[in-house]
Amino acid sequence: MAQSFRRRHIQVGRKSKWRVVGFVVGGILGAAFVFCIVVLMLVLHSPPPPAIHTDPLSAKQFEEEYRGAVAAARAGSPQIVRADETQVNTELEAFMRAYRSRSQQGDGSVLTDAKIKLLGNQMQAYIFLDYKGQKLTLQLTGKLHAVNGFLQFEPESGKVGELPIPKSRLEAAGRQMMNAPGNNPHYRLPANISDIRVEDSKLIFVMK
């Protein structure tokens, strides 16, 4: 009788332990599932684009100033040209129109639009992508400067949708992009520009 009771007690104890294990594993799987859903929602949720103004007349004025600075720099007088956010985005809008007209839909991500905010000494880029029919938004904030004639972007923060990207990941991706074979020529500055940076919410071109 006592032995039978002990066997039943042991069996009940084992079943209780397995129930606890099942409960813990189920909880972990449930939490992982919820986490994946939250991450997916954050990635796919595209924040509204920033309010950006464009002005063709202002952009034309900048182009004239830039050409004048190039001529003066060639004559031996270094120049600095400043472009405000409106001028930058007007030029960017024209570039995107030309880009979309010659780009073709492929299997990977396709750039559909881009906007720039100039904040103090930082540039904030909003990049809109179409990845296999899914609309995604990439937001990057960082600093611009030149190193040995090449344009450099130092990321400070970034998001995909509403999901923050760790700074270490951003820096690693930036290094990989800069060091990729064939990419360096895309970041080489014209010979007459010694530096590009953001200062007082303006894009600064230092001409030599």
Image (cartoon, grey):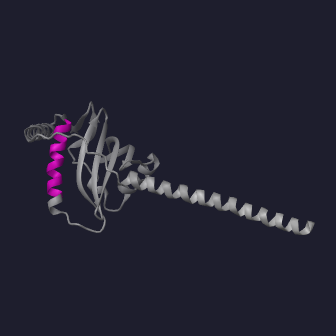
Residue shown at the point (64%, 57%) measured from the top left: 24
- Any part of residue 174 in sight: no
Tell which of 185 and 100 is nearer to you. Answer: 100
Identify whether 123 is placed above or below 136. above
Identify whether 1 is placed above or below 51. below
Main secondary structure along the magenta-highlighted residues = helix
Q: In the shown orientation, is residue 121 left or right of residue 166?
A: left
Identify whether 119 is placed above or below 166. above
Q: Where on the picture, by quarter, is residue 7?
A: bottom right
Residue shown at the point (38%, 47%) measured from the top left: 162
Of the 4 image quadrants, the one containing the C terminus is top left
Tell which of 87 and 37 is nearer to you. Answer: 37
Q: Is residue 96 magenta?
A: yes
Q: In the shown orientation, is residue 7 left or right of residue 183?
A: right
Of the 4 image quadrants, the one containing the N terminus is bottom right
Tell which of 47 and 73 is nearer to you. Answer: 47
Q: Residue 179, image x and y in percent?
A: 38, 57
Q: Residue 146, image x and y in percent?
A: 31, 43
- Any part of residue 126 in sight: yes
Furthest toward the front, the residue is 1
Residue shown at the point (24%, 49%) measured from the top left: 114
Q: Residue 5, image x and y in percent?
A: 87, 65
- What's drawn in magenta, residue-wise? 84-99
Q: Where on the picture, by quarter, is residue 13?
A: bottom right
